[in-house]
């Protein structure tokens, strides 16, 4: 059974009723120019050839699809495959779209890449891409995340990026986005906002989705080679949602493939204790888009928390909001302690240290696998490696 979900967004940037471009009038022409140039670049054989060459020779793609045999045997249920985005250059899936954004920025004649980051992986990836193509780079990061993710802050600075500490609001990812957007508004002619997920005003959810979809295209070919059939389940963590839609997009038309996005329930479902946007949020406006949002009665974004800095965002990409409403993807939650347990489980069973973000997806996949027969197949997007989280985990688990 097929559907047309892969064809979205429409010409106005909407995935169903979600998305759009809610920005100040003075920025409309800037975003229209980005959209126009991207649509040309998307069909430009030279642009695509350069991008694909970098994915192969610089990033190291295709990333492996690894059957976690030890973990599968220990759980005793479905086969667990890991899509190893942690093995990419810079250690996560983020490099897939930052290289594309950097090439597009250079094509547009921009001088600087600007972005937010939470866990720091997007900041590192954008700083890497900026160094490669010869652009300046400025990364805005919340003070709390800077303290948690010191190794990535150091990497960004070594790569030549300017790191701006955001001390306002909750001092985490949402506030970093606010700060970066304010900086972008001051000089949009020379700056390209290399947004870090499938969020923000059109065309960014589409652009990031398209560059990340390489994950699912590879996984599809790889699982057919290994198992001669499609998987039964795809599982990925969701903050903004770039790694999840990267895996899901290629399979959206295959109704027999079930998809599960995993949000952080943090310390619980109390105010400010979680970031389970699709689970507990409702439609609203944030960062230039209409999407699901954790908000108060006046539409003001609520404080959020996750042990994974890359997931503590009160909104979500509009593509995920649409997929939730249409029932194509089911969104579940994993709490901090479950994620930490999965982090250690994978490390000690397979010798792979995952990012805390990815550990949320893994934690859910372990519970799912245990409930399924052995002939079933699960693919987990292991979206990043855990180097950045090691010190934090050691401190919090008394290792």
Image (cartoon, rainbow, N blue to C red):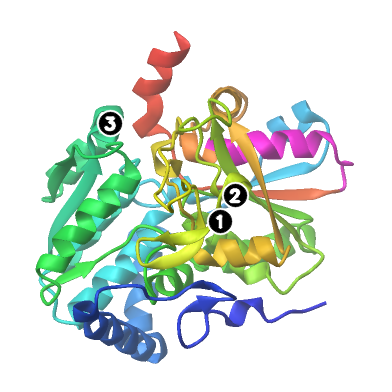
Identify the element where label 1 is drawn: helix
Whether 100 is drawn above or below 340: the answer is: below
Relative to 146, 358 lies left or right = right
Residue stretch rendered in magenta on the structure: 359-375
| Figure quadrant of residue 109 | bottom left
Label 2 Cα crowd, 10 Å radius (few <14 / some 14-19 / many 20+): many
Q: Residue at x 49, y 39 (%)?
A: 357
Q: Answer few, some or many: residues within 10 Å of disc 3's Cα (few below 14, many 20 plus, some between 14 and 19).
A: some
Dot 2: what SS? strand
Res 399 visible: no
Instruction: Using the numbered discs, state the Cα–Cα distance from disc 3 to disc 1 in whole angstroms.
Output: 25 Å
The residue to which callout 2 is attached is: 236
Q: At 43% across and 15% down in the image, what residue appears?
A: 396
> Dot 1 corresponds to which residue?
244
Label 2 to label 1, Cα distance in Å?
A: 5 Å
Residue lying farthest front? 298
User: Is residue 97 left or right of 278 when viewed as pictured?
Assistant: left
Residue pointed to by mark 3 = 144
Residue at horizontal 47 percent and vertical 13 percent from the top: 397
* Residue 312 image offset from top left, x and y in percent: 43, 41
Q: Are marks 2 and 1 in contact (CB under 8 Å)?
A: yes
Residue 173 shows in this picture: yes
Q: Nearer the viewer, residue 377 or 251?
A: 251
Considering only vertical position in the picture, is 128 above or below 206? above
Is residue 360 one of those drawn in magenta?
Answer: yes
| Mark 2 or 3, closer to the camera | 3
Q: Earlier in the sequence, mark 2 or mark 3?
A: 3
Give the quarter of the figure containing the C terminus.
top left
| Residue 111 image-quadrant placement | bottom left
Q: CA distance from mark 2 to mark 3?
A: 25 Å
Q: Position of residue 34 (x, y in %)?
A: 28, 82
């Amino acid at each position: 059974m097929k559907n047309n979900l892969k064809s979205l967004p429409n010409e106005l940037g909407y995935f169903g009723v979600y998305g759009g471009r809610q920005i100040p009038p003075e920025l409309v022409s800037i975003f229209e120019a980005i959209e126009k140039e991207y649509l040309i670049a998307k069909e430009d054989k030279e642009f695509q050839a350069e991008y694909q060459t970098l994915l192969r020779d610089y990033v190291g793609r295709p990333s492996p699809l690894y059957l976690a045999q030890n973990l599968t045997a220990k759980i005793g249920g479905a086969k667990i495959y890991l899509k190893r985005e942690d093995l990419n250059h810079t250690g996560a899936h983020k490099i897939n779209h930052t290289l594309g954004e950097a090439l597009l920025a250079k094509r547009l004649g921009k001088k600087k890449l600007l972005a937010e980051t939470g866990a720091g992986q997007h900041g590192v990836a954008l700083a890497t891409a900026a160094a490669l193509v010869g652009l300046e780079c400025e990364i805005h990061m919340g003070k709390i995340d800077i303290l948690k993710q010191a190794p990535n802050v150091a990497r960004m600075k070594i790569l030549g990026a300017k790191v701006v500490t955001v001390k306002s609001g909750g001092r985490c990812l949402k506030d970093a986005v606010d700060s970066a957007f304010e900086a972008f508004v001051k000089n949009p002619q020379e700056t390209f906002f290399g947004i870090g997920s499938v969020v923000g005003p059109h065309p960014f959810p589409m652009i990031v989705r398209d560059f990340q979809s390489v994950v699912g295209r590879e996984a599809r070919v790889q699982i057919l080679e290994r198992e001669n059939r499609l998987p039964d389940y795809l599982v990925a963590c969701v903050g903004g949602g770039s790694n999840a839609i990267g895996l899901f997009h290629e399979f959206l038309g295959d109704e027999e493939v079930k998809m599960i996005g995993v949000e952080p329930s943090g310390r619980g479902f109390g105010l400010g204790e979680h970031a389970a946007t699709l689970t507990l949020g409702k439609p609203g406006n944030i960062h230039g888009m209409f999407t699901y949002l954790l908000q108060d009665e006046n539409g003001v974004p609520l404080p959020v928390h996750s042990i994974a800095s890359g997931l503590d965002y009160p909104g979500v990409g509009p593509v995920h909001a649409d997929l939730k409403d249409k029932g194509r993807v089911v969104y579940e939650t994993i709490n901090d302690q479950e994620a930490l347990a999965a982090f250690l489980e994978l490390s000690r069973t397979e010798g792979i240290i995952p990012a805390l973000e990815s550990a949320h997806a893994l934690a859910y996949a372990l519970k799912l696998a245990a409930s399924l027969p052995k002939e079933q197949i699960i693919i987990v997007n292991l979206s990043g490696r855990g180097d950045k989280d090691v010190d934090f985990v050691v401190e919090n688990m008394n290792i």
